[in-house]
C-alpha cells in the first residue's frame, strides 16, 4: 500500500454512527479525522473533526431502512476534507460475534448472513451495523469490508466462566456469558503490554454510559462483568448492572409511580 491509502471505520450504535478516517503506511495506521452522525437528529448532520478543526456539515438525505442516501451523502461530505477515492477498506465494529466470530473477518455474503443470524443476541446494535455494511456494499461494491467483534476478545475465557447456572441444553444453544467492550479491552491490553510489561494480571475498567470490568492475564481476557447481555455487571448511566431478578418480580406485582 502507498502512504496515500485510506482506511475508513464505522462504529454503529443503536442511534448514532461514528466514522473514523486513517491513512495507511505499511502496517501502521495514522488517525486523520473522525465524525459522528446522530440518526435521530433533525436536521441530519455530520459533525467532523480534523485536527483542531470541527465542521458541522448538514445532510439532506432521509434516514431510510437501507441508508443508501445517508451513506452516499456522507461519502460526499468526507470527500470535502479527505481523498476518499483512496479508501481501500472499511472496518466495522459489530457488537456480537456469538460463538462463530472470534476474530476479525472479511465481510462476504456468508459472514454477513452470520452476523444477521445473531440479531436476537443484540437486537439494538446488530441491525444497525448490518444497515451500514449493506449500504456501503451498495455504494462501493468493490471496497473491501471487514468486521471486528466486541465479544471476540472474551472468547479466551474458560468455559466454566462463561456458563450460567441453567440446563446444559440452554448453554449449548448459546445462552452463556459472552462479555462485551472487547475492542476497547484489546486496545488497552496492547497498551499495557507496551507501557507496563510486568503487569501480568490486571483488572481494567471501561467507563462510559456503558461500563464494565475485565480481568486480564498476560493481555488475555479471563473474566468480564458483562455476561449474556450488556445489562449485567456494574452500574451504568441508564442500566443498573447486576440486579436481583426478585426486584423485577416485586416491581411487576405493584403499581409504579407515574414519574417512572
Image (cartoon, grey):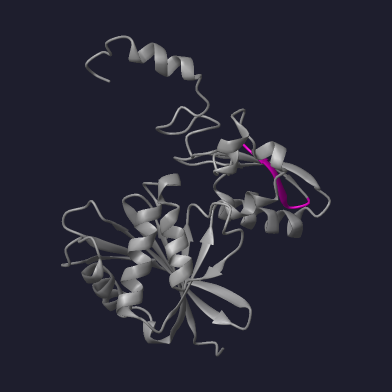
Q: Position of residue 107 (x, y in %)?
A: 47, 71
Q: Quadrant of the C terminus?
A: top left
Task: Left or right? Give the position of 118 relative to 98.
Answer: left
Task: Left or right? Give the position of 2 relative to 86.
Answer: right
Q: Quadrant of the N terminus?
A: bottom right
Q: Position of residue 61 (x, y in %)?
A: 17, 67
Whether residue 226 is visible to the viewer of this picture, yes or no, is no
Looking at this view, name the residue that lies furthest to the top.
254
Whether residue 200 is visible to the viewer of this picture, yes or no, is yes
- Based on the picture, tell me whether residue 33 belongs to the magenta stretch: no
Please say if 224 is above or below 260. Answer: below
Say which quarter of the image contains residue 255: top left
Please say if 53 is above or below 175. Answer: below
Magenta range is: 218-226
Say which quarter of the image contains residue 128: bottom left
Of the pair 37 and 214, the residue shown nearer to us = 214
Task: Left or right? Give the position of 227 relative to 109.
Answer: right
Residue at position x 55%, y 80% from top? 24
Please say if 258 is above or below 133. Answer: above
Of the pair 197 and 248, the residue shown nearer to us = 248
Amino acid at each position: 500500500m502507498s502512504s496515500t491509502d485510506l482506511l475508513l471505520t464505522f462504529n454503529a450504535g443503536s442511534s448514532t454512527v461514528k466514522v473514523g478516517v486513517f491513512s495507511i503506511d505499511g502496517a501502521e495506521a495514522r488517525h486523520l479525522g473522525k465524525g459522528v452522525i446522530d440518526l435521530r437528529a433533525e436536521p441530519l448532520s455530520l459533525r467532523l473533526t480534523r485536527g483542531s478543526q470541527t465542521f458541522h456539515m448538514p445532510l439532506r438525505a432521509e434516514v431510510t431502512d437501507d441508508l443508501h442516501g445517508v451513506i452516499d451523502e456522507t461519502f460526499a461530505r468526507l470527500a470535502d476534507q479527505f481523498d476518499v477515492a483512496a479508501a481501500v477498506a472499511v472496518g466495522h465494529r459489530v457488537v456480537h460475534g456469538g460463538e462463530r466470530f472470534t476474530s476479525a473477518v472479511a465481510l462476504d455474503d456468508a459472514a454477513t448472513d452470520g452476523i444477521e443470524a445473531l440479531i436476537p443476541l443484540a437486537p439494538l446494535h446488530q441491525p444497525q451495523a448490518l444497515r451500514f455494511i449493506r449500504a456501503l456494499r451498495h455504494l462501493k461494491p468493490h471496497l473491501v469490508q471487514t468486521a471486528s467483534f466486541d465479544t471476540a476478545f472474551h472468547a479466551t475465557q474458560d468455559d466454566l466462566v462463561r456458563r450460567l447456572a441453567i440446563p446444559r441444553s440452554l448453554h449449548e444453544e448459546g445462552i452463556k456469558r459472552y462479555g462485551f467492550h472487547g475492542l476497547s479491552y484489546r486496545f488497552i491490553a496492547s497498551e499495557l503490554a507496551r507501557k507496563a510489561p510486568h503487569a501480568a494480571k490486571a483488572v481494567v475498567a471501561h467507563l462510559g454510559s456503558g461500563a464494565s470490568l475485565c480481568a486480564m492475564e498476560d493481555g488475555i481476557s479471563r473474566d468480564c462483568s458483562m455476561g449474556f447481555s450488556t445489562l449485567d455487571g456494574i452500574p451504568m448511566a441508564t442500566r443498573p448492572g447486576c440486579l436481583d431478578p426478585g426486584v423485577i418480580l416485586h416491581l411487576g406485582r405493584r403499581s409504579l409511580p407515574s414519574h417512572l
